[in-house]
Amino acid sequence: MKKINVSSKLSFIISIITSIIFVLYFAYRGLMVYFVQKAMDDTFVGGNTSDITITLWFGISVAMALSMFLFFQFTKIKDLNSQRTIQKGIFIGWTIIAIAMIIFIPSYIYFILITIVSSIVSFLSSITLKHKITEDLKNKKETLSEKEIYLLQKLAGVKDPKK
């Protein structure tokens, strides 16, 4: 069985693209609801309509924009353990979003599929990082650090051990 290697950078990029899609869609919906509300206010004089729907659409859009910027910042992290922890969190986040969308708004099938794909890619990236971390630990055990070499030379009685 061949292992599927998914880099964490690819996972972050897919999450960024997914977030951009959500931002654009929710901002569009917020604008449409805003314009419909303004038209209703102009048509029916004195009709106080609720701004809660508009606030929710724009609030979700802003939240997804912030997550998009976070994903962009995550691409700069070099530590594999940190990347793996972040990938696990992203996997859990996209999975929760996908399940919530399946339960509450099953008609948005494309958004559900996009979040499921993002979730799967994050999960595969986490597994790939796990394998990279174990390989690095195996390679690290097979080699000695400079300090270990220095201490062994000193213990062996070498007169001029090189640091």
Image (tube, grey):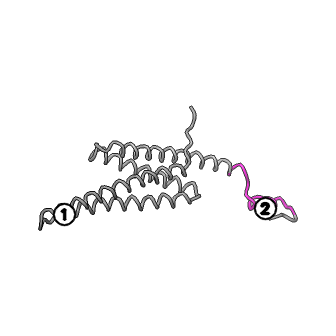
Q: Taking 8 as reference, is 57 above or below it?
A: below
Q: Secondary structure at mark 1?
A: loop
Residue 78 locus on image (x, y percent): 59, 58
Residue 131 locus on image (x, y percent): 58, 45
Pick whichever, 4 or 111, lies toward us. Answer: 111
Give the class, few, some or many, for how many residues have Cα within 10 Å of label 2's Cα (few <14, many ≥20): some
Give the residue displayed 40% in from the left and 50% down from the top.
Answer: 94
Residue 47 locus on image (x, y percent): 13, 65
Asked if the residue under mark 1 is in contact with the one under mark 2, i.e. CB atoms within 8 Å, the reply is: no
Pick whichever, 77 or 150, lies toward us. Answer: 77
Q: Which residues are magenta?
A: 140-158
Q: Is residue 144 magenta?
A: yes
Pick whichever, 116 or 22, lies toward us. Answer: 22
Q: Secondary structure at mark 2?
A: helix
Main secondary structure of the magenta stretch: helix
Task: Tell me the residue that label 1 is attached to.
Answer: 50
Q: Taking 50 as reference, is 105 above or below it?
A: above
Nearer-N-terminus badge (2/1): 1
CA separation in Å, label 2 and label 1? 73 Å
User: Three-letter amino acid code at disc 1?
Assistant: Ser
Pick whichever, 131 or 143, lies toward us. Answer: 131
Outermost front residue = 43
